[in-house]
Image (tube, helix red, strand yellow):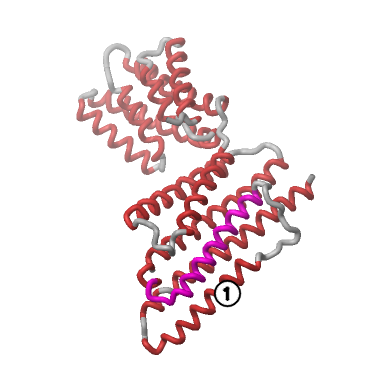
Amino acid sequence: MRLGARIIKTGIAVTLSLYLASMFNLEPVIFAALAAVLAIQPSLYRSWQNVLEQLQANVIGAVVAVSFTYLLGNEPFVVGLVVIIVIAINLRLRFEKSIPLAIITVIAIMESTEGNFLLFALDRFLLILLGIGSSVVVNAIFLPPKYEDRLYRELNEATYDILSYLRSSTLDELDERRYREEVRRLKDQLIKIDQIYLLFKEERTYFRKVTYSKQRKLVLFRKMIHANQKGLALLKSIEKHKCNLAQVPLGLTKLLQEEIDILTNYHERILLKYERKLRSHHPHMIPTDVFSGRDQVLTQFMSLYKENQEQQDEDWIHLFPLFAQLIDYADELERLDKLVEAYYSFHEQRL
C-alpha cells in the first residue's frame, strides 16, 4: 500500500480542523472535518483557485438554507427541496466542484431550529469555513508535491510497457485476451499521465530562471506523451490488422519487425539521452538506421501492392493505416530527439 502526499495531507487537514473546532468551541466538530476532506486539493494552485468558488458556494447554501428554514421549517422534504435548489444554483454558476461542500453546509444548518437559529446557523457555517481554511493551510505548508518526478516516472513505466509489447507485436506471441486488457490499461495510464502533466503545468514558480526551465520541460514532456500515444496507436493498429499481415510475404513481415525493433531501440536511446546517460549530438544527427529501415519497408510494401493491385485484394488496402502509424511514430521520435538535444544545448549555453 502506497501513501501519497494527498492522503497524508488529508489526514493532517482533518486533524487540524478538529483541533481548531475544539479550540473555538464549535460543535459538532465532524462538520469541520468533512469540509476539510472535501476541500483538500492535489496542489496549492488548485487550492487557491477553488477556495473562492467554495466560499461562494457555501454562502449560497447557507443563505438558501436559512431562508427556507424560516419560511418552511426543517422537515425532510424541505431539506431535500433546498438541496435541489442549491445544486441547481451552483450548476448555473458553474460551481460543480463545490456542490458536495454546499450540500454539507445545507444539512449542517438545517439540522435543528431550536434556540437562536441564526446563531446556530452561524456556528455551523463557521465550522465549514474552518474546514476549508484548514485544507488551504495544509496545502500551502505541508508536503509540496513533486509532480515533475512523478510525471517522468509514470512516463518511463508506460514507455517501457509499450515498447515491450511492440517488440512482440508481429511475432504472434501475445495472448489476445490478455493483450486487450493490457491495451486498456496502457490507455488508462496515458490518461493518468495527462492529468499529472496538468498538475505539473499548474505548479507556480517564482523565479524567472526556473520558469524558463519549466516551460521547456513542459514542451519536452508533452512531446514524450505524444510519442507514447503514437507507439500505442501503432501497437493497436498491428493487432487490428494481424489477419491482414498474415497474408503478406514473410519478407515484408520480417522487415516490419526489424523496423519496429529499430524504432523501439531509438525511443529507449532518446530517454537515456534525456537522463544524460547517453551523449547528445550538436548539431542534431538523424539516425540513418531508423529512416533507411522505414524506407525499405515502405518500398517493398508499395511494390507488392502494385503487383497485387490487379487482383483487387482488399487485404493490402487495409494495411495502409498500419504503415501510416509506423511513419507517424518514426516522425514523432525524430521530433522528440531534436527537442531533447535542444533542451540540453540550451542549458549548457545558459551555464
68 vs 311, nearest the viewer: 311
**Relative image position of residue 206 (x, y in whole percent):** 67, 36
181 vs 200, nearest the viewer: 181
Q: Which residues are magenta?
A: 246-274
Q: Residues within 10 Å of mark 1 (few under 14, many from 20)?
A: some
Q: For the point 61% across and 58% down, which residue is it?
A: 336
Q: For the point 43% across and 51% down, which residue is it?
A: 186
Q: Which residue is mark 1?
A: 295
Decide: is 183 above or below 97: below
- Disc 1 on helix, strand or loop? helix
249 vs 264, nearest the viewer: 249
Residue 315 appears anywhere in the view: yes
Q: Can you tell which quarter of the image residue 96 is in?
A: top left
**Relative image position of residue 158 (x, y in whole percent):** 49, 49
The reply to whether the magenta stretch includes residue 265 is yes
Magenta segment, principal secondary structure? helix
Residue 219 appears anywhere in the view: no
Location of the N terminus (image quadrant): top left
The reply to whether the magenta stretch includes residue 243 is no
| 347 left or right of 141 in image | right
Residue type indicated by callout 1: Asp
Q: For the point 41% across and 39% down, which residue is it?
A: 95
Q: For the point 74% across and 51% down, which residue is it?
A: 346
**Relative image position of residue 227 (x, y in whole percent):** 54, 57
**Relative image position of residue 265 (x, y in whole percent):** 58, 58
Location of the C terminus (image quadrant): top right
27 vs 329, nearest the viewer: 329
Decide: is 301 above or below 339: below
Task: Give the tally of numbered discs.
Answer: 1
